[in-house]
Amino acid sequence: MKKIRIGILGVAGRGKSFFDNILVNDGEIVAVCDIWQPNLDTAKRTLGDVATYLDFNDFIEHEGMDAILVSNYFHEHAPFAIRALEKNVHVLSECISNGTMAEGVALVRAAERSNAIYMLAENYPFMIFNQEMRRVYRGGTLGKVLFAEGEYNHPLDPNGVKYIRELCPHSKHWRYQLPRAYYITHSLAPLMYITGSRPTRVCALPVVAPLEQENGISKGVPERAAIITCLNDDNSVYRVTGCAAFGSHENSYRICAEHGQIENLRDGSSRVLLNYDSWSVPKGREVHNLYKPEWPEETRALIERSGHGGGDFFVIKEFFDCIRENRRPEFDVYFATTTASVAILGHRSMLENGVPYDIPDFRNEDDRAKYENDKLSPFYNTLDGSEPTIPQTNFPEYNMTPEKMAEYDRKINTSEVE
């Protein structure tokens, strides 16, 4: 089996978490790139004989590198993915694929010109219950999907200042600025993976409940969630969240179809509940079926230690298989930019109190032309120094003034919050 020689851009967080999964899938990490030398030093101690680069321009020229994993800041993946595709280097990109609509257009055009493969590194679809729901749904006994729900619920302890500081070290960091609609792939992508339905229209509304604690540390936006509704290309409907912070920590998915429904339980057990209408029960099933799917014995140990419920293992496996077999990934550039468009336009809908937006299909040049100059963004950009061009929230009293940002920076980095 051909070893895939891969380089990693960004090795402090997600990049580092993929080391083992790359190695067990017959990959070889040949180069790493990061803007912080201590991160490179740590990676070299872990990996041994690996080339290190502070400059991406040097990194992308590394001889014999087949592919790169793009795992830098959340909203800044596209420019590096485009550079790699232009050099016919395969790209596995963390989420989201593009921070602006214009970047989505440029990314698709680069992927279409390239001989290399582009894949979104979205891991939640590969969790065992989502793979089981796909297997059952694609088996046909439930009929056509009508409605589906996806939740990614990740509240943070507001008094856990050390952890907050690690995630969001300053007020211009993307996590502080993050609108709730943007971090959408963990709730949306599993539904698309299970059903194959593609969003074509989106509207969104906020769940507003500002989180203020005695220590004065709070997220930059007052929303706890974005409730996002998508009309799909087969007339089904999705209801998803971005990165929500209501209720308790969990991720859950439900597929409602013509003859019944299937969902994972919210108890952390990975159990699946499959219910059929009493008049539509297929042979070998009951009306109510509660069970826990299991990984194959021969790969269980590798999968279970890989992170994110086994998802990280399958992300690397699928990417490497696509390279070796020269086939298009399911999470290709069109899948990726569709999810990003739902995030970006869902946020705009929320800013306009739920006004719907059509989701472009970037296979079509007419749709691409409409957005090729659309660079609106709620984020500070570390690559060019640009500032946000649209608000992070629709509530002016919570806009991020210089005073509020300075207060966050003071409190998150002083002893008063230890």
Image (cartoon, helix red, strand yellow):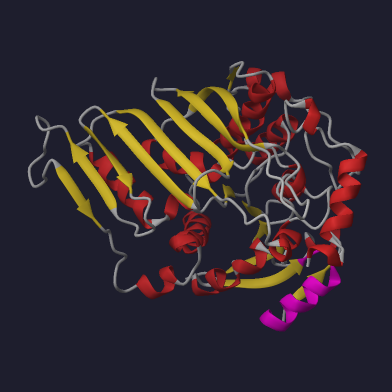
Q: Would you say residue 324 is visible in this rendering?
A: yes
* Principal secondary structure, stretch drawn in magenta: helix
Q: Quadrant of residue 341?
A: top right
- Name the residue: 48% across, 64% down: 313
213 lies left or right of 287: right
As rendered, which of 41 and 215 lies closer to the eye?
A: 215
| 226 part of magenta stretch | no
300 to the left or right of 76: left
Quarter of the image for residue 297 reads bottom left
Q: Is residue 100 left or right of residue 35?
A: left
One can see residue 376 in this view: no
Of residue 410 and residue 195, the one placed in the foreground of this image is: 410
Question: x%, y% of residue 353?
Answer: 64, 19
Question: Going 33% across and 36% down the picture, which residue do you hit?
Answer: 255
Q: Within the image, what quadrant is residue 392 found in? A: top right
Point out residue 321 in the picture as x, y percentages from the top left corner: 47, 59
Query: On the rendered structure, is 154 left or right of 59?
Result: left
**Residue 304 drawn above or below residue 45:** above
Number of marks in the image? 0
Q: Which residues are magenta?
A: 33-48
Name the quarter where the C terminus is drawn. bottom right
37 magenta-colored = yes
Which residue is rendered at x = 79% and y = 63% of the image?
417
Q: Nearer the viewer, residue 200 or 356?
A: 356
Q: Is residue 416 above or below residue 322?
A: below
Image coordinates for residue 13, horizontal then vertical, percent: 68, 64
- Name, please, the residue furthest toward the front: 214
Image x and y of residue 79, in percent: 77, 45
Q: Residue at x 47, y 51 (%)?
A: 250
